[in-house]
Image (tube, rainbow, N blue to C red):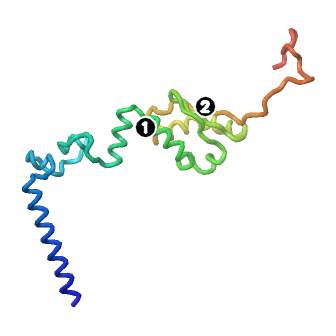
Amino acid sequence: MPGEDAERQISSAREALAAAVQDARARDDRPASARSGRKNFPERSNADPAAQRGGRSEDPQPLGAAITRLLAERGWQQQAAVGSAFGRWEEIVGPELSAHARPDGFADGELLIVADSTAWATQLRLLAATLVRRLNAELGDGTVRRVKVRGPAGPPRKPGAWRAPGGRGPRDTYG
């Protein structure tokens, strides 16, 4: 009968587990926290998970905790936050604005945004304070201090037949 076969397998598995537990006890193969009398599952906090367990820093850790620790050790938190904002640009500013403008760089608290037309560049300049508030709400207060907007790049200017070779003349007041 199928029930007897399943019972035999369960019984065999229990015997194998009991033998493994007995062998581990004989070799004292317990985690370091169990040998020292500490709880196996410490309370969660922001401290180093390896230090909480009483283990070494090389012990396995949750991936998120390891990445957070690496970013903190290297001082990369701000760059990572700004990079995530670049990746979530449409979500942060909305689909209409993201269709006409994109972030191009970030340095010293200044975010450079490139618009696809001069009209959108003007609109972005008017929305700069709102963008700074929205980005700081996403990235952390004070991360973005200023937004600089650049319009579309025009064709490069080349000297031609209709240009004065030395630039403006002595009485040129236009411009």
Residue 34 at x, y percent in the picture: 11, 50
Q: Is residue 122 left or right of residue 143?
A: right
Give the numbered dot on residue 112: none
Q: In this view, does 86 lie to the left or right of 157?
A: left
Crowd class of label 1 (few under 14; some 14 to 19; many from 20; radius 10 Å): some
Residue 99 at x, y percent in the picture: 65, 48
Which residue is found at the position 14% from the left and 46% from the top?
32
Crowd class of label 2 (few under 14; some 14 to 19; many from 20; radius 10 Å): some
Residue furthest out toward the bottom: 1
Residue furthest out toward the right: 161
**Real-space Cα separation, disc 2 to disc 1, in angstroms:** 19 Å
Give the quarter of the figure containing the C terminus.
top right
Give the numbered dot on residue 148: 2
Q: Is residue 49 left or right of residue 102?
A: left
Hey, which quadrant is residue 130 in on the image?
A: top right
Which residue is found at the position 72% from the left and 40% from the top?
117
Give the quarter of the figure containing the N terminus.
bottom left
Which residue is found at the position 18% from the left and 76% from the top?
10
Residue 22 at x, y percent in the picture: 8, 61
Hey, which quadrant is residue 106 in on the image?
A: top right
Total marks shown come to 2
Quick one: label 2 or label 1, which is nearer the N terminus?
1
Q: Are marks 2 and 1 in contact (CB under 8 Å)?
A: no
The secondary element bearing badge 2 is classed as strand
Residue 36 at x, y percent in the picture: 9, 45
Residue under label 1: 140
Hey, what amino acid is under mark 1? Gly
Hey, what amino acid is under mark 2? Lys
